[in-house]
Image (cartoon, rainbow, N blue to C red):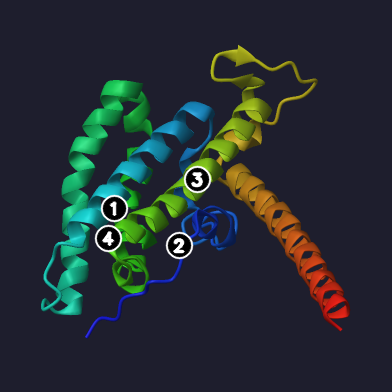
Amino acid sequence: MEQKTTGKVKLSDGIINQNMVLMSGLFAGPVIGAATNLKNSLVIAMAFTLITVISVGLCRLLPKKIAFAVRIGLYALIASLVYIPVTLLTELIFGADMVSSISLYLAIIVTNPFIMTKTESRFFLRPVHMMFKDLAGFAIGFDLSCILVGAIRDILSDNMLWNTIIPLPFQMSAMENVYGGFILVGVLAGLFRFVYRRYLGRKTRLDTEREDFSRKITY
């Protein structure tokens, strides 16, 4: 019988603690391959959020009596069906040419870990309202990471951000390539983890000091 998790949901879990791009790297592929500029990153972020949230919500409705292997196949099928209207919507907003240039990476979103694995291991173990809050944290974490990478690559490769010129004394055309994205994501992930660990260390020290101070007052 499925056990429900009723613990408190923190948005920071998906945004920071378990960020799927900068912390675990479990779904960095579309960011590395397609987020070569700010516009592309917005397309990826929008498609990822809509496909993931809608698909997980629909997959939740499937009967738990269905065999696990069959359910996973149905999750992929549902996400594939959701992918079609989401792609049409992104084409309407951003233009068909832009969307088609990164269509391969949009298709990868259909089998992302949020739909294929975390549904069973995390999201479906929570009540519906808590599931969507938890899912929102992970989606926001992915979107922010994607947009950050796209903006930096836009600036470094073309000295522009959207249509705004950013005057820099150099250009790094390699940022438009996959290996440039791989290096950038690796550097950002290292910095992200370093800052996060420093924060945790400082928080631990402060908590310890507060506990020691409280004991002194008590005694």
Give the x, y percent position of residue 9: 45, 62
* Among numbered discs 2 and 4, the one appearing first in the sequence: 2
Residue 11 higher or lower than 105, as above or below: below
Residue 110 numbered tag: 1
Instruction: Tell me whether the residue at label 4 lies in contact with that at label 3, contact meaning CB atoms closer than 8 angstroms.
Output: no
Within-10-Å neighbours for mark 4: few <14, some 14–19, many 20+: few
Q: Choose mark 1 or mark 4, whichever is in front.
A: 4
Q: Amino acid at mark 1?
A: Val
* Among numbered discs 3 and 1, the one appearing first in the sequence: 3
* Among numbered discs 1 and 4, the one appearing first in the sequence: 1
Quadrant position of the C terminus in the picture: bottom right
Determine which residue is flagged by label 3.
31
Viewer-nearest residue: 150 or 199: 199
Q: Amino acid at mark 3?
A: Val
Determine which residue is flagged by label 2.
9
Give the x, y percent position of residue 164: 60, 13
* Among numbered discs 4 and 3, the one appearing first in the sequence: 3
Q: Choose mark 3 or mark 2, whichever is in front.
A: 2
Give the side of residue 142 with respect to residue 170, left or right. Answer: left
Determine which residue is flagged by label 4.
128
Instruction: Measure how far apart labels 2 and 4 are at the Cα level.
Output: 12 Å
Q: Choose mark 4 or mark 3, whichever is in front.
A: 4
Residue 53 higher or lower than 91, as above or below: below
Q: Secondary structure at mark 3?
A: helix
Q: Is residue 95 visible?
A: no
Instruction: Measure how far apart labels 3 and 1 are at the Cα level.
Output: 15 Å
> Residue at horizontal 67%, vertical 49%?
188
